[in-house]
Structure formats: structure tokens, C-alpha cells
Amino acid sequence: MKGIIYLSRARINFTKDDLSALAANASARNKKLGVTGYLSFDGEELFIQYIEGEDADVSRLFELIYNDNRHKVTHFLKCDVDDRRFPDWAMQLIDQHEFKIVHDLMICHLFYIDSARSVVDYKNRLIWNAVDAMADINLEQRH
């Protein structure tokens, strides 16, 4: 299995209704593909999305996401996934304020990944730790 997290900038203005429709459409599509994850929007222009599932399905979905002209993917990371972090979320639209610290941490690290290998490795670990922290919060809320 594979996980991908990305940061993107909106090219259009998204209303709450637009975001709800986007999440509903993504959820329906992801259920068919067997992909899970979440989508977060900062209310202005930045999206963070995490998707996980079988390699081919995640790769195919990310290609569609990457080529969507409503936003521009600026940074992304891929990793191998042993177990799903968000097994119950076909595509959960999360309120970025609910996860503000984790959300801001991911934005910061995704923005500042640079060419120094040791810095990249360190920041990559921080980003995946932040995704794991969100998964832990999700797990606590399910119980």
C-alpha cells in the first residue's frame, strides 16, 4: 500500500458549499477505488490532502488530483503504508481549526523541504509523524 500527502494552492475561490461538494464527490470516487484519507483547507488558498490505498489506485487518483486545474500541487511526499491510518474515511473533509497545530506543522514542513538530504529526511519524518498524530486523534474519536 501507498500513502501520499500533498500541499496545493487553490486557483479558484472555494466556498463552504464548494468544499462540501468536492469532499462528497471525492468520497464517492474513493470508495469505488478503495482509497481512504482526508482533505483540509485553510479557508483561504491552501489544501492538504492525504490519501492511502493500493499502489496503483493511489497513483491513478493522485494523477487525477495533480492534473485538476482548480488547484496547483506545490509539494508532495509518498510513503509505503503497512496499515491504513484512516480506514473509515473515504474522504473526510476536516476543519483545519480542529487540527490546527498538526495542520500548521505540515504546511510549514511541506513548504520548507529543501535540497539538503539530511534536512529532507528529517522534515519528511516530521510530516509523517504529523499524519500519524492525526490518525491517533481519529482513532481516539472512533472509540
Image (cartoon, helix red, strand yellow):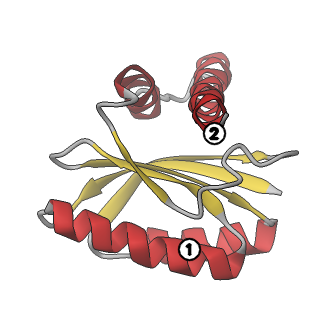
Query: Where 143 falls versus 14 (above or below)?
Result: above
Q: Residue at x 55, y 80 (%)?
A: 29
Q: Are marks 1 and 2 in contact (CB under 8 Å)?
A: no
Quarter of the picture holding the N terminus: bottom right
Q: Position of residue 20 (x, y in %)?
A: 29, 66
Foreground residue, 88 or 59?
Answer: 88
Say left or right for 32 vs 56: left
Say left or right for 98 vs 115: left
Q: Position of residue 127 (x, y in %)?
A: 57, 28
Q: Residue at x 66, y 55 (%)?
A: 88
Determine crowd level at label 2: few under 14, some 14-19, many 20+ residues with C-alpha closer than 10 A.
few
Which residue reaches farthest front? 143
N-terminal of the two: label 1 or label 2? 1
What distance separates the C-alpha of mark 1 from that of mark 2? 31 Å
Query: Where 133 falls versus 57 (above or below)?
Result: above
Determine crowd level at label 1: few under 14, some 14-19, many 20+ residues with C-alpha closer than 10 A.
few
Q: Residue at x 88, y 45 (%)?
A: 82
Q: Amino acid at mark 2?
A: Arg
Q: Is residue 11 visible?
A: no
Say left or right for 109 vs 71: right
Mark seen at residue 142: 2
Foreground residue, 105 or 78?
Answer: 105
Quarter of the picture holding the C terminus: top right
Foreground residue, 101 or 118?
Answer: 101
Q: Amino acid at mark 1?
A: Glu
